[in-house]
Image: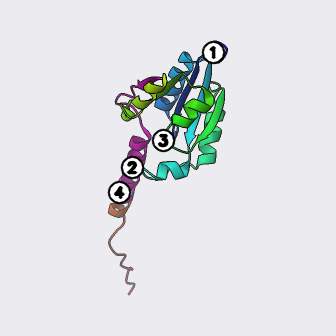
Amino acid sequence: MFKEKTIVYTSGTFDMFHYNHLRMINYARALADILIVGVSTDELVSSYKAAPIIPFNERLQIIEALKTPDIVIPQHTLDHTEIVKKLNIDAFVVGDDWYGKYDYLKEMDVQVFYFPYGTGVSSSNLKKTIHDSYEATLASQRKAKPDSIKPDIVK
């Protein structure tokens, strides 16, 4: 602890920022005297899944605009060993889709909280919904158009 302050770190891609992102950040805030939020860079995200829809600088600005974080920083790696040491992190909060991945931090006396997202909204679900809606719109437009247009023959 820093002068009896609890320092909590949470991080994520925060692509297509949504309600569950906000819930996790607010949960981390409730545990913290000082809340640090890491936003994954485009390069980091692209190393393990599809590139984010929203560019890094915009995602960073969205998180900075929230009233909950005290500090917002870029996240360049999924290994949080160095960030824990450099910033004296007491606790780490991450979505439960990463369950078990950060248990190694417990060996560094960091409390690890896997925040339950539940079955609600996720960036992946949002992307799928948008894609499926777009595909359905295209399909209905194709059906609405005649196969060919025959000009009226005037005699």
Separation (CA) of disc 3 from disc 1: 25 Å
Along the viewing direction, whichever of 47 and 2 lies nearer the viewer: 2
Where is the N terminus found, in terms of image quarters? top right
Q: Is residue 95 visible?
A: no
Which element carries disc 4, helix, strand or loop? helix
Where is the C terminus found, in terms of image quarters? bottom left
**For mark 3, what is the residue?**
78
Q: Mark 2 belongs to which amino acid?
A: Ser
Is there a contact, CB below 8 Å, between mark 3 and mark 1? no
Which numbered disc flags the more N-terminal residue, 4 or 2? 2
Q: Mark 4 belongs to which amino acid?
A: Ser
Is there a contact, CB below 8 Å, between mark 1 and mark 4? no
Q: Which residues are magenta?
A: 111-139
Which mark's residue is nearer the viewer, 4 or 3? 3
The disc placed on residue 133 is 2
Question: Residue 113 placed where, x, y %?
Answer: 44, 23
**For mark 4, what is the residue?**
140
Along the viewing direction, whichever of 90 and 140 lies nearer the viewer: 90
Which mark's residue is nearer the viewer, 2 or 1? 1
**As drawn, 137 above or below 84:** below
Which numbered disc flags the more N-terminal residue, 1 or 4? 1
Q: Mark 1 belongs to which amino acid?
A: Lys
Queried whether the magenta region covers residue 122, the answer comes back as yes
